[in-house]
Image: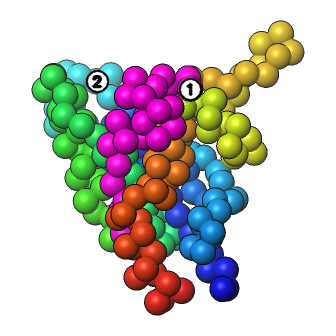
Amino acid sequence: MSNKIIKFAGFDPSLRNFGIVTGSLNLDTAEVTDVSIKLIETEATSAKKTVRTNSDDLRRANEIWRGIKPIVDSVNIVFAELPVGSQSSRAQTSYGLCLGVLACIDKPIIQLTPNDIKMHIGGKKDTSKNTIIEWAVSKHPDAGWFTKKVKGEVSIVSKNEHPADALAAVYTGLETDQYRQAVSMMRAFF
């Protein structure tokens, strides 16, 4: 059996903090290597009086797309935690924009829900953000996690939540029928 290595990306989409992880994936063993993280952060403009909210949303979605497009172009498969609906119209707008960005991806997307990921990583639907961050950092400590140094002590910061969720999406996705079907097709081409 030959080792077929492909490039992957994992996404945790959000309008404010779009978590990204990239790396290599062995199709035969499902081994994940060469992991690195990235976070695309966008903020609403402070010029509320001069810029319409929908124009600002369009700018932010464009920033995200411009940030992930080169990544999408360089990988063979994408794993993504799909956002779920929300109670507020503002959060629903973010949800729609993130789905729109994901819809532009022209590669196979393995789709996961937040509950899929929490169950896979922590074994329960209320697995904490810190549990997922700790899992991700221990799984790939050299991925470039965001840290801060206080009084000589280096610690992991909370914004790692987003790339950690992206990495968790990858590992959760590796266990899905959708992934197994995609791999069957990819083996014919790689």
| Residue 33: percent from left, percent from top | 68, 60
As drawn, 3 above or below 25: below
Q: Nearer the viewer, mark 2 or mark 1?
A: 1
User: Residue 118, can we see it?
Assistant: yes
Tell how many labels. Answer: 2
Earlier-in-chain disc, 2 versus 1: 2
Q: Residues within 10 Å of mark 2 (few under 14, many from 20)?
A: few
Task: Say what secondary structure mark 2 lies in.
Answer: loop
Q: Residue 10: tell me if it is visible.
A: no
Q: Is residue 109 magenta?
A: yes
Q: Circle 1 is placed at which residue position?
A: 131
In the image, which disc is placed on residue 171? none
Mark 1 is surrounded, within 10 Å at the Cα level, by few (under 14), some (14 to 19) or many (20 or more) other residues, namely some
Q: Position of residue 82 (x, y in %)?
A: 31, 46
| Residue lying at 35% horizontally and 36% vertically, measured from the top left | 115
**Side of 182 where 1 appears, left or right:** right
Q: Amino acid at mark 2?
A: Ala
C-alpha span from label 2 to label 1: 37 Å
Q: Which residue is mark 2?
A: 47
Percent position of residue 159, x then y: 54, 28
Q: Residue at x 48, y 89 (%)?
A: 189
User: Vertical placement of 164 versus 2: above or below?
Assistant: above
Identify the image quadrant of the C terminus. Answer: bottom right
Quadrant location of residue 98?
Answer: top left
Q: Which residues are magenta?
A: 108-131
The amino acid type, in three-letter code, at marker 1 is: Thr
Q: Farthest residue to the top: give it.
A: 151
Q: Quadrant of residue 97?
A: top left
Extreme residue in the bottom direction: 188
- Residue at (42% x, 28% y) in the render: 124
The percent coordinates of residue 94 (x first, y second) are 24, 36
